Amino acid sequence: MAMTEHGPLTRENLKSHRAAAIAGILFSIILILVFGLLRISVPDDPQEPGSWLKSESSTVALAVNLVPFAGIAFLWFIGVLRDRLGEREDKFFATVFFGSGLLFLAMLFVAAAVAGALIISFEAAPSQLINSATFHFARATAYNLMNVYAVKMAGVFMITTSTLAIYTGFAPRWLAILGYTLALSLLFGSYYLSWSFVVFPLWVLVVSIYILIGPHAVSSPAQTHSR
């Protein structure tokens, strides 16, 4: 009997709003650290000659190895948040919410894999890689994935999450408006803002902190039916 009671209790704790908040905070901290390490190590110009591979490869490798942990935390954040929304989750916005989150993660992982492949290739044949078209292609691919496509998907995720917040009440309206504003800056101004990539994890951090310490406004499905 004790094991039977312990099972649902553990499952409920894993699906609580605190679990979503902690996962979101971990994702934000790790991703900001990743972006910070890349920012101080790799030049913005995708046409640079690759001098960072000689002096900053260990820093970039650390950033790349942290990406999977950020991805796991983000998936947990999405899963717990969707579970808390329950039947109040709109199917249309839920599809865009889930799809944009997965696309963001996919592009983040691919960009990290390309960067990791460059480091491994450089260690095997330094001079041949730097002077090859393959290096410039891979460098441009990683740059476009992160600074164009992944950033745009992050903006879409912020818009749909803010819309769900307004419809379901799991976050206050001011937080949703902030999400809309920051998302528009990512969609239309990321090319002009060199630090635009930190907007998304910072916003997730704010949302997660609110979920952790703010009032828990979203009712579970069982509570909804009981009313």
Image (cartoon, rainbow, N blue to C red):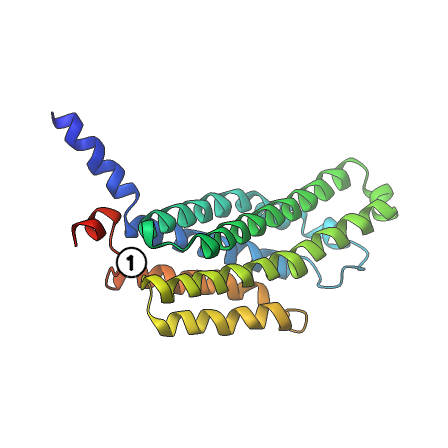
User: Which residue is located at x 53 percent, y 68 percent?
Assistant: 183
**Viewer-nearest residue: 220 or 61:** 220
Q: Is residue 110 left or right of residue 221?
A: right
Compared with 79, 174 (above or below) is below
User: Which residue is located at x 68 percent, y 46 percent?
Assistant: 115
Q: Position of residue 177 (x, y in %)?
A: 43, 74
Q: Is residue 49 left or right of residue 192?
A: right
- Quadrant of residue 8 in the image? top left
**On the rendered image, what quadrant is the N terminus found in?**
top left
**On the rendered image, what quadrant is the C terminus found in?**
bottom left
Callout 1: helix, strand or loop? helix
Would residue 195 be visible to someone looking at this image?
A: no
Would residue 81 be visible to someone looking at this image?
A: yes
**Viewer-nearest residue: 26 or 162:** 162
Q: Position of residue 189 (x, y in %)?
A: 63, 73
Q: Position of residue 223 (x, y in %)?
A: 19, 51
Residue lying at the far left of the rendered structure: 1
Compared with 158, 138 (above or below) is above
Q: Which residue is mark 1?
A: 212
User: Which residue is located at x 52 percent, y 52 percent?
Assistant: 101
Circle 1 Cα neighbour tier, 10 Å, few/some/many (<14 / 14–19 / ≥20)? some
**Viewer-nearest residue: 196 or 128:** 196
Type of the residue with mark 1: Leu
Number of numbered discs visible in the structure rendering: 1
Q: Position of residue 207 (x, y in %)?
A: 38, 63
